[in-house]
Image: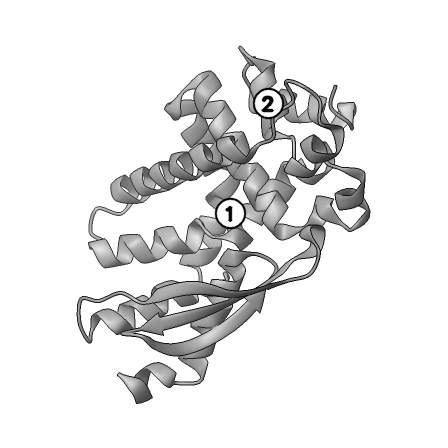
Amino acid sequence: MLKNKDCVERLKKSFGFVWRDEDLLHQALTHSSYTYEKRRVGVVNNQRLEFLGDAVLELAISDYLYHRYPDWDEGELTKMRAAVVCEPSLVRAARKLELGFCLNMGKGEERSGGRERPSILADAFEALLGAVYLDQGQATAGKLALFCLKPVLQDILEGRCDRDYKTELQEIVQQCGSEQVKYTIIKEAGPDHDKKFTAGVYYQGIMLGRGTGGSKKDAEQQAAKAALEENELFRKI
């Protein structure tokens, strides 16, 4: 059984539907540290569901933006989607659902603050969407995604949200040619429960900036931010 049963029960009631296969929910709420420590037969972590949920989320937001803003061009739609489908937004959605308290995780990960770790919360939200998709279908999963991310969408439209540095950098690069910038993780440090990643952003083989974060996505954002702030792009292209 999952830990924090009361929180999980509240989560189930908030969905407004009855799960056909609750094992999918349990899997979505099971962090890899739990399966590593327990090593029980049949216990599966949420990494595969996270992979699926990422695609479900992108489709849901793309569909919403496409129909909600018929006058926007591809660039505007892409920029908005990137701003919504990013780690800070997903963490905000996960906290709204109190996913951190519902997660089944290893004791070591929990002691190190795993229930509040941004990368874990963002992954859990995507895994949950993947589970809802398999259990209830795309329509229900999409409605859940939009319900949780509507406040983020509103904040972005009103200029109250963090910038998406990766999209900003790519838009500048596209003015110089069709080649895209590339991101590479150049360093990993720290134990598994508290890793730090350092990413470099490159254009035509030239490093434009580097950044460090608690997840690969965050490190890439920081690398893009460094490239923009240091004006490396304008000096080197």
The image position of residue 203, as x and y in percent, is 30, 73
Q: Is residue 226 above or below residue 2?
A: below
What is the C-alpha distance between the residues marked 2 and 1? 24 Å
The image position of residue 23, as x and y in percent, is 60, 17
Q: Nearer the viewer, residue 68 or 172?
A: 172
Q: Residues within 10 Å of mark 2 (few under 14, many from 20)?
A: many
Q: Is residue 14 visible?
A: no
Q: Is residue 172 left or right of residue 128?
A: left
Q: Quadrant of residue 78?
A: bottom left
User: Which residue is drawn at the image coordinates 45% and 20% (left, top)?
Assistant: 134
Q: Is residue 183 above or below residue 143?
A: below
Dividing the image into 4 quarters, which one contains the C terminus?
bottom left
The image position of residue 6, as x and y in percent, is 77, 24
Q: Is residue 11 above or below residue 195?
A: above
For badge 2, the amino acid type reads: Leu
User: Which residue is drawn at the image coordinates 38% and 85% (left, top)?
Assistant: 231
User: Which residue is drawn at the image coordinates 59% and 50% (left, top)?
Assistant: 119
Residue picked out by circle 2: 25
Q: Name, please, the residue furthest toward the left.
A: 177
Q: Earlier in the sequence, mark 2 or mark 1?
A: 2
Q: Nearer the viewer, residue 140 or 23?
A: 23
For badge 1, the amino acid type reads: Pro
Residue picked out by circle 1: 151
Q: Nearer the viewer, residue 172 or 186?
A: 186
The image position of residue 197, as x and y in percent, is 57, 62
